[in-house]
Image (tube, rainbow, N blue to C red):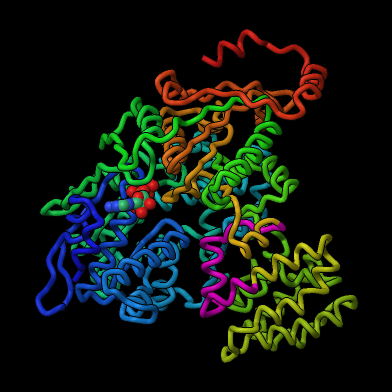
């Protein structure tokens, strides 16, 4: 049972949410109906959820029977940490005491995809899956689609046939929304409508190929889980694993996830979901804000709804700006955020000339704030798109400011990292031909044709690693081939311990890496990090899958050093900054083309999502918020001839919003040179229209 001290830190509605339901007599658990906590940013939703987990555990619910669904793995880890902390305080516990015993049993916490992965492996044979299936990351999935497309002769149909990423997007949208292909094309990909038949053919072949290779893509994890929950017997068995199911960031779940949750607990028993419809920012990945809006009505009797009004995160000045931004947005649950933390300094709107000056400004301010006692890790720079921090990263490197970047896939996209993972993936699932094809071609003399030949041979030997011994490798590959066969017979031994496997793979891979790539030294650093990470996972399968599902933050010279001294600036896309908070937040490129994004400028609902994105960014700030407006902003649009457009301030910065900011300009150290350059290279500037655009 929770102690009064522990609950005492909560406000009344938070406490009501934490204790909602009733403890069963004799410490036998806790019974509760469905509960929705819907509230604005920083009102303590995640905190309340962590308290509820602790409360349940301390009321006798076995933590191993609590399912916690979060948006990222990072959030899952954080939630466990918070729950542990709360229990420790409540039980007045030392390390190793009851609290940590309880939190060690909180094993079912993760994203929908990662929990789906675990359940599917467990129930694999009931749903016709091989339990050693591999999970394809998005780029591998797109490549596989591409191969299938070429085989079907669809690539030759001229350039108008949708590209591989588009095809994958279509697949994903259709799967996650459960809409028909026709509806998907009509609403999201109208320019592809005329290809409907060929797309259907392609996707059918893609599905068959995945099944042949024993691979699932991200969306399949949910799709299979969903299908599994449609079978009454299995659904019952899965449901019985959990007494309580708690979901954070519920506003960004999609239809499939909503349906899975409902199938897990049809009467809503033990279900708690929390979210903020004003922070729904994933509709481009088919998230359905209706899930949260319609949640209460999914049940009879209806779910209990608790709202939280007080904001514990930000100063009132930050909230005034955020409230003003959302005032014009059409929404269902209206909230007005009220700070518990006092007025605080007014946010700043800083105009700079161009992107290098923006980078210089950020670096200068970040260092000044550190001098003033705000550590780097309490400061964050947020941006709309991963590439928006490019210039800043160079500037930070120049000044030796360590940073970690969230939200890019760079680490896993690096060829050498993908190579190493491909070896592990293939070892894990011999039928994974996507990985196999990649690995075979590391060896000298092994091009696509020989790799194909080797694979056909392997298939004829029933996917037994020993079968490779009798393969006639081309002359150049003879020596390498022997080592390859040795490696895979070692990795393929089911009794081999996971510890040490990466090291073995690295030794084998190193000469190939040195032959194939430049800058080997840097790459070795990445592989070191990969090896370090691997020790946190109990098995090879968990390692490769979890890494694929939720890639770690980007690495590189800066961030690997950053981990050691724990003093680093955070760079993050806004999408990856959900749920987080920092003392100081800088938002880059608050201009048209970025807010809203140039690609989102079509439909009104897309524009609204862009507004919410800016809202998420602003509400990450505890004390100081700085939005930067570069006047010369580079975008990829073909409309601009020199790659620059003269930026108009974001349309979301209306007069009402700007009133909440102090306006400033920052002159870079190089201003004169830059003015001369820009005058020389940019031809005539339409000053009048630029000025008009600003208002
Ligand atoms: P978001 O919408 O951004 O996910 P949230 O509603 O989940 O935000 P939390 O992250 O749980 O909010 O809480 C925001 C901050 O407020 C955290 O620093 C948290 O520790 C603090 N906080 C929450 N509730 C209380 C409370 N009752 N007393 C003191 N601090 C609190
Ligand atoms: Mg939260």
Residue at figure coordinates x 46%, y 35% from the top left: 614
30 shown above or below 280:
below
Q: Position of residue 655 (x, y in %)?
A: 43, 18
The answer, for residue 653, to whether it is visible in the render is yes
Q: Residue furthest top?
A: 688
Residue 30 lies in quadrant: bottom left
443 shown above or below 265:
below
Q: Return the residue nearer the eye: 233 or 2.
A: 2
Residue 463 shown left or right of residue 378 in the figure? right
Residue 339 shown left or right of residue 167 in the figure? left
The magenta region covers: 531-557
669 shown above or below 620:
above
Residue 248 shown left or right of residue 269 in the figure? right
Residue 400 falls inside the magenta stretch: no
| Total residue callouts | 0
Q: Residue furthest bottom?
A: 495
Q: Position of residue 429 (x, y in %)?
A: 58, 76
Q: Quadrant of the N terminus?
A: bottom left
Q: Return the residue nearer the eye: 297 or 80.
A: 80
Q: Residue furthest front?
A: 372
Residue at figure coordinates x 56%, y 60% from the top left: 551
Residue at figure coordinates x 77%, y 20% from the top left: 675
Q: Return the residue nearer the eye: 217 or 420.
A: 420
Q: Position of residue 142 (x, y in %)?
A: 60, 54
Residue 532 falls inside the magenta stretch: yes
Q: Position of residue 253 (x, y in %)?
A: 37, 51
The answer, for residue 254, to whether it is visible in the render is no
């Amino acid at each position: 049972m929770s102690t009064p001290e522990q609950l005492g830190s909560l406000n009344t509605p938070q406490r009501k949410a934490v204790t909602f339901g009733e403890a069963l007599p004799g410490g036998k658990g806790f019974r509760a109906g469905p509960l929705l906590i819907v509230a604005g940013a920083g009102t303590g939703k995640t905190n309340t959820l962590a308290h509820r987990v602790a409360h349940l555990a301390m009321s006798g619910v076995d933590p191993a029977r609590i399912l916690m669904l979060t948006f990222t793995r990072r959030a899952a880890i954080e939630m466990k940490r918070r729950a542990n902390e709360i229990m420790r305080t409540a039980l007045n516990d030392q390390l190793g005491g009851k609290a940590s015993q309880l939190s060690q049993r909180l094993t079912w916490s993760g994203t929908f995809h990662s929990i789906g992965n675990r359940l599917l492996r467990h129930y694999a044979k009931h749903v016709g899956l091989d339990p050693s299936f591999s999970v394809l990351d998005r780029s591998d999935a797109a490549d596989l689609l591409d191969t299938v497309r070429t085989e079907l002769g669809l690539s030759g149909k001229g350039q108008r046939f949708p590209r591989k990423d588009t095809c994958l997007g279509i697949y994903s949208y259709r799967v996650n929304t459960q809409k028909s292909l026709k509806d998907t094309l009509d609403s999201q990909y109208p320019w592809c409508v005329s290809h409907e038949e060929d797309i259907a053919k392609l996707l059918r072949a893609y599905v068959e190929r995945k099944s042949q290779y024993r691979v699932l893509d991200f969306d399949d994890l949910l799709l299979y889980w969903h299908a599994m929950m449609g079978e009454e017997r299995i659904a019952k068995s899965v449901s019985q694993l959990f007494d309580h199911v708690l979901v954070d960031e519920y506003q960004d779940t999609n239809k499939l996830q909503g349906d899975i949750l409902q199938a897990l607990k049809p009467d809503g028993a033990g279900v708690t979901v929390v979210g903020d419809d004003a922070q729904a920012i994933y509709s481009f990945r088919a998230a359905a804000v209706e899930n949260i809006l319609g949640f209460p009505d999914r049940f009879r009797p209806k779910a209990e709804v608790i709202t939280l009004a007080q904001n514990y995160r930000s100063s009132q000045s930050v909230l005034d700006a955020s409230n003003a931004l959302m005032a014009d947005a059409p929404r269902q649950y209206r909230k007005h955020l009220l700070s518990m933390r006092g007025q605080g300094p007014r946010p700043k709107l800083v105009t700079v000339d161009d992107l290098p000056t923006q980078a210089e400004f950020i670096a200068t301010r970040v260092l000044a704030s550190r001098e003033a006692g705000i550590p780097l890790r309490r400061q964050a720079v947020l941006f709309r798109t991963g590439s928006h921090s490019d210039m800043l990263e160079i500037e930070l490197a120049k000044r030796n400011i360590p940073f970690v970047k969230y939200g890019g896939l760079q680490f896993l996209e690096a060829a050498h990292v993908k190579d190493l993972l491909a070896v592990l993936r293939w070892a894990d699932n011999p039928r994974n031909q996507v990985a196999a094809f990649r690995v075979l071609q590391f060896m000298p003399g092994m091009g696509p044709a020989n790799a194909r030949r080797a694979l056909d041979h392997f298939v004829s030997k029933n996917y037994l690693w020993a079968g490779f011994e009798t393969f006639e490798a081309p002359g150049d590959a003879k020596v390498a081939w022997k080592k390859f066969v040795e490696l895979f017979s070692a990795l393929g031994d089911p009794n081999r311990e996971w510890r040490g496997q990466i090291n073995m793979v690295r030794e084998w891979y190193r000469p190939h890496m040195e032959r194939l790539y430049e800058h080997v030294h840097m790459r070795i650093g990445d592989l070191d990090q990969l090896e370090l990470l691997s020790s946190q996972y109990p098995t090879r399968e968990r390692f490769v899958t979890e890494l694929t599902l939720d890639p770690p933050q980007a690495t590189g010279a800066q961030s690997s050093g950053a981990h050691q001294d724990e003093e680093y600036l955070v760079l993050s896309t806004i999408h990856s900054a959900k749920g987080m908070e920092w003392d100081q937040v800088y938002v880059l490129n608050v201009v048209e083309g970025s807010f809203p994004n140039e690609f989102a400028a079509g439909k009104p609902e897309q524009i609204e999502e862009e507004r919410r994105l800016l809202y998420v960014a602003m509400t990450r700030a505890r004390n100081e918020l700085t939005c930067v407006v570069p006047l010369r902003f580079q975008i990829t649009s073909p409309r601009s001839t020199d790659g620059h457009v003269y930026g108009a301030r974001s349309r979301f910065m209306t007069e009402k919003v700007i009133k909440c900011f102090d306006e400033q300009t920052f002159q870079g150290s190089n201003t004169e040179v830059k003015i001369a350059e820009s005058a020389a290279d940019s031809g005539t500037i339409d000053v009048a229209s630029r000025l008009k655009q600003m208002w």
